[in-house]
Amino acid sequence: MSESSGPTSPRTPRQSTGGPAKRADMVTIADVARHAGVAVSTVSYVLSGKRAISASTRERVLASVRSLGYHPNAGARALASRRANVIALVLPLRSGMHLPVLMQFATAVVTTARQFDHDVLLMTADEGPGGLRRIAASAMVDGIVLMDVEMHDVRVPLLRDLERPSVLIGFPADPSGLTCVDLDFYRAGAACVEHLAGLGHRTVALLGAPAVVYDRNTGFAHRTRAGFAETAQRHGIAAVAQPCEENFDAVAQELAGLLERQPELSALVVHNEAAVGQVLAALPALGRRVPEDVSVVAICPDEVAERASPALTSVLVPAEEVGRQAVSLLMRKLEEEPVPEGTLLPPRLTVRASTAVAPVGPARRVRTGSPAG
Amino acid sequence: MSESSGPTSPRTPRQSTGGPAKRADMVTIADVARHAGVAVSTVSYVLSGKRAISASTRERVLASVRSLGYHPNAGARALASRRANVIALVLPLRSGMHLPVLMQFATAVVTTARQFDHDVLLMTADEGPGGLRRIAASAMVDGIVLMDVEMHDVRVPLLRDLERPSVLIGFPADPSGLTCVDLDFYRAGAACVEHLAGLGHRTVALLGAPAVVYDRNTGFAHRTRAGFAETAQRHGIAAVAQPCEENFDAVAQELAGLLERQPELSALVVHNEAAVGQVLAALPALGRRVPEDVSVVAICPDEVAERASPALTSVLVPAEEVGRQAVSLLMRKLEEEPVPEGTLLPPRLTVRASTAVAPVGPARRVRTGSPAG
DNA sequence: CGCCGGTTTCGAAGCGCTTCGACTTTCGCC
DNA sequence: GGCGAAAGTCGAAGCGCTTCGAAACCGGCG
């Protein structure tokens, strides 16, 4: 442990300058052309492949490119070709959306975009419609991927007649004329109920996102609830759904209330990553073992489900897949190919240790005090 | 709950086209000039403020800008001015770095950059040095902010003689010639110990990041440990430090081992966001109450500390502040102003409910079975 | 031998903006 | 009343690239 507070303390501020680009080493396409003994346009065609170039010249040009370390100037290229080779990713950064999923998603978008030779400009939703307009009008990006779209999102009308293609993550109330991708949350909610029904549960509850998310009319929360409720009804299962805050005390209190009002409750669907841990911690305190007394199904990333104890049966939120799809769709739109308006990814339920067959008979453990029976 | 599975099912794929930009409405600076009855250069000067323009002309030009909805073309501007007004943000996306902090940080970077009229290009570290070189050489960005720098980061030498300024989050082993920002983790570790020392604790333990993070020689983990260990020594406090995995069972096991080897242990410093919840869940199971039997100090975002039960005394990781600082420093470098090589942000410890004075005397509760004494 | 079609390469005209130097006015002041 | 400086505006030359039309070159055919 040979380290000290920091290699350079803030009190002895050595200064480093290193201003902006030293123009010196800006290799241009003209340099390459000269070096290879060809015309500038020939170099361009070699690099873009838009016209046939003889193998010998191509090799010569490519050799020059390598030996000079040439990288095309992005601005010039964008100006001349009217393509920036950049897409915008608009992140929500609002409460309720859970962060790790966002990151996963962002990563997938960047990675996929790179595969299509595009870069990603990061925007936050708080720039609002104005930001979108700016970025689109300035030709800074060729297209836009938008996360966390609400049912009645102010940006939707704008997108519809914006001069650049876009792909939305999530469905607004009216997705016509747009391109939307999302996990099929309706079926996700349904899948949870079906799994529980198969285990014999007759009374289940959904703990969802914080109330504010529902109020904001966020599609995925409502759709999950619908899938949950309608499937329960179809199976003749008693079901209640309620929002769920994310701090421990609120979760514990909500659970206690739930168990009081619904003593028969034998299973929980938790659609809130941040609350999952709290739920698992609170249940034992209320005298319920998981999964012996209460089964728990979560809708969350695998990572979270696996880390929990017991490991959670879960429907994963396929953030990566959604990101990949979104970018692929956008690329197709950039190529003027037609794409489907809506893409719903099917949910996948993974069974782990937190669900079991429903307790038999009237099946109700005495709560506190005397353990066992 | 009027919703169904999705407004458009994947089986009835209506198609939407909406290809790339409809060139129609590209308003150029020439259009503005014509509309305002001035020269193109005058419009440019009004917009940039680089030369004095009479109030009357300025108003006229600005009116034209508004009424035509003019937005300067980013590519053209970048080409002519040799400034893209974009900075790159390179995210790690490695295990061990915790995600929510990353997001917070990214948000701060974007927001701050916008205040300086810059946009943010998002890169992932997995493009490696080649990606940095590409983005710098293509003049796509004016500068670079790099996260999660390791002690012996391969990208560091590259950055040092890259033609664009950069700011690193975290300190490599040799930060000379660079500009680095970070929380002062050494002092953070120290602050935790001092707080505990003040409460009379004599035996403490540090639960850190997963072992892999230490192996990777990540500076912040080592520095925290150093601050922890050295401060403990100075106070004559018995201290052990150990890595900590993030799943519940591993945490519980580590804690059990710790308590067995160090029965006197009365306080824990947890420097691992993901493990914090697990620690709090595991302690009661081991017969230790927080804070009566064991005090816990965390190094984590306030959000996590507040959500826990009991609310955690913590040193917050000032992600936002770090992001802001990083961008500010980068902007100053872009202006050719000198900046300090190292900036260490002082830690701030917030006392909450998870720490208390050390149990008195030999102070060791009997563990299981008979509660109280 | 000259011409044709195909292939390969070249030259030049922008893309929309910034910026430099120069020109025109306007003022202050001796 | 005239001169110089300051203030305001203009025109034109690029920035580095793409792309279009045409030139140059190649065989092979009539």
Image (spheres, coloured by chain):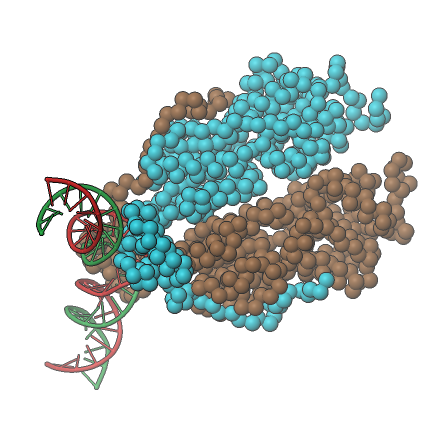
Chain colours: A cyan, B brown, C green, D red
Report the residue at 74% width, 16% height from top. A360
The relative height of residue A324 versus residue A188 in the rendered view (above or below) is below
From this viewpoint, is residue B310 visible?
A: yes
The relative height of residue B47 versus residue A223 in the rendered view (above or below) is below
From this viewpoint, is residue B350 visible?
A: no
Report the residue at 57% width, 68% height from top. B176
Across and down, in percent, residue A205 comes to 63, 23
| Figure quadrant of residue B366 | top right
Across and down, in percent, residue A279 comes to 68, 33
Q: Nearer the viewer, residue B330 or A331?
A: A331
Across and down, in percent, residue B178 comes to 54, 65
Report the residue at 76% width, 32% height from top. A285
Q: Nearer the viewer, residue B264 or C28?
A: B264
- Left or right placement of residue B269 versus residue B136 in this view: right
| Figure quadrant of residue A104 | top right
- Left or right placement of residue B226 versus residue A188 in this view: right
Position of the C terminus of chain B by quadrant: top right
Across and down, in percent, residue A42 comes to 28, 54
Report the residue at 63% width, 38% height from top. A303
Number of dots carrying numbers = 0
The relative height of residue A67 versus residue B257 in the rendered view (above or below) is below
